[in-house]
Amino acid sequence: MMFNRKQPTHDAGKEPDAAPVSSGIEQAVGSIAREAAGLGKESAELNGMIEDLAATSAKQKETFKTLAREIEAMVHANEAIEARTRASTASVKKARDAVDQVGHGVISVTAKLADMANAAQEITQVALQTRLVAFNATVEAARAGDAGRGFGVVAEAVKDLAAKVESSSKLITITIQELDARITALAADIRSGSGKGDGPSEKHGFDAAVSDVELSVEDIASSARQNLQVCAGVLKSVDGLSIQVGDTAESLQVARKRTEIFLSLSESLIDLAAESGIRTDDTPFIESAIAIGARICGLFEEEVRSGRLSMENLFEDHYRKIPGTDPEQFRAPFTEFCDQSLQHVLEGILAWSPKVIFGVISDQRGYVPTHNKQYSRPQSADPVWNQAHCRNRTFFTGRTEMAAARNRRPFLLQTYRRDMGAGHYVVIKSLAVPLIIEGRHWGTMRIGYKF
């Protein structure tokens, strides 16, 4: 279908100057429509750019919040390390105090052992003397003959006992001497804490190990404190940046709303020009869109009357997610009918003019059951490619799409920046006509075309 712009014709029944006046009005309205379209295009472009910046700022704000949370976690970890080092220092001090107490105890034990050794030696002397006395008693008993035999037996027993006590006392003395030597060395090592190194600064033994532990713990605590200072500084900077980005995002939102006002004004001017009855550049698209919308409504109603599709199915909000799709796609009870019976109608819209980019239908919730073939390809493993080439069976709920889906006027002409995927955008006009099926507003038929 090729568009033919209607030319004004002279009506003999009118005044001679009616045609020039009409022509002048038509030119003026056409000029207003073109100026409004240009304003709409610029507003849509600016609005889209601000929206992108606002979205980026919002993402940056969330990123800063995440970073702040991670830094706070680092702060808590370093605080925990510092707390543990304080506890470790206290434990080392307790260990040192305990060792000092052990040292005093060992020294005390050494003294006790000395006393025991002296007592053992005294027992040895007593045993030796007892053996001498027992020996003398044995000699005297022998001299006494039979009269001293009982006394001699006792003397022998005492002598044997004294020998055993002497032997045991000597063994105790030797053991005490060995133990005393070991404990004395341990006590000396505990008292000194230093000793056999080649230089005066070299430390050995338990005290040196404790000192090394103390130094290491203090190093860890110092590092943790430095980390805390660094984290606090970074966290303060991140919080400041987050606030700045948040303020920027809010300012951008305000700016975007203002550009939407200009965009709405330009769209109102375009609508007024289109509804004036004077032909503009958009008139051929409007007339053809209304005709195609009526045809699509007729195909829907024919399907309903045949019983192949019920009104309940047509208007229900049950959308089944298609597994494995990215971006997500959905099926509705009327999806197959739209693919089979309406897609070829939408394909025909692309032949209207080289300016036409797409023709599509959607219900009032923004669900697009079918699309042009070039935008209805099977999905691949690449979500970015899918976003540009698999635009059927999905939802479009932006400002333009939802205004079109809910519009009940004969037509709605808007301007917007269309996301083509992969970071590519194009500013186009969106022309929507309502789809009324059996007296009920189902959704919209929408076409997009270039300026």
Image: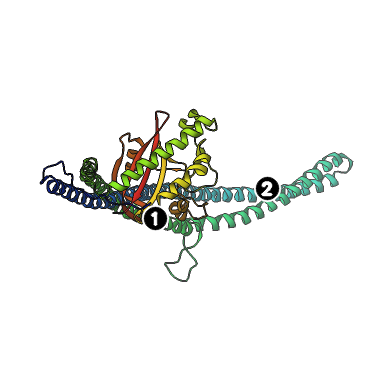
Q: Identify the residue at horizontal 62%, vertical 47% (top origin).
A: 119
The furthest residue to the right: 146
Give residue 21's mark: none
Q: Nearer the viewer, residue 318 or 163?
A: 318
Q: Which mark sits nearer the N-terminus, 2 or 1?
A: 2
Q: Tell me the amino acid under the disc marked 1.
A: Glu
Q: Tell me the element at label 2.
A: helix
**Looking at the image, which is closer to me, 149 or 262?**
262
Task: Label 1: state its secondary structure.
Answer: helix
What distance separates the C-alpha of mark 2 from that of mark 1?
A: 60 Å
Residue found at x 16% / y 44%: 12
**Residue that label 1 marks:** 218
Q: Amino acid at mark 2?
A: Val
Residue 93 visible somewhere in the drawing: no
Question: Whole-percent x and y of residue 87?
Answer: 43, 46
Categorize mark 2 by other alpha carbons within 10 Å: few (<14), some (14-19), many (20+). Answer: some
* Residue identified by numbered label 2: 126
Q: Is residue 34 visible?
A: yes
Q: Nearer the viewer, residue 287 or 165?
A: 287
Which residue is located at x 48 percent, y 29 percent? Answer: 311
Locate residue 304 relative to residue 33 in the image: left or right: right
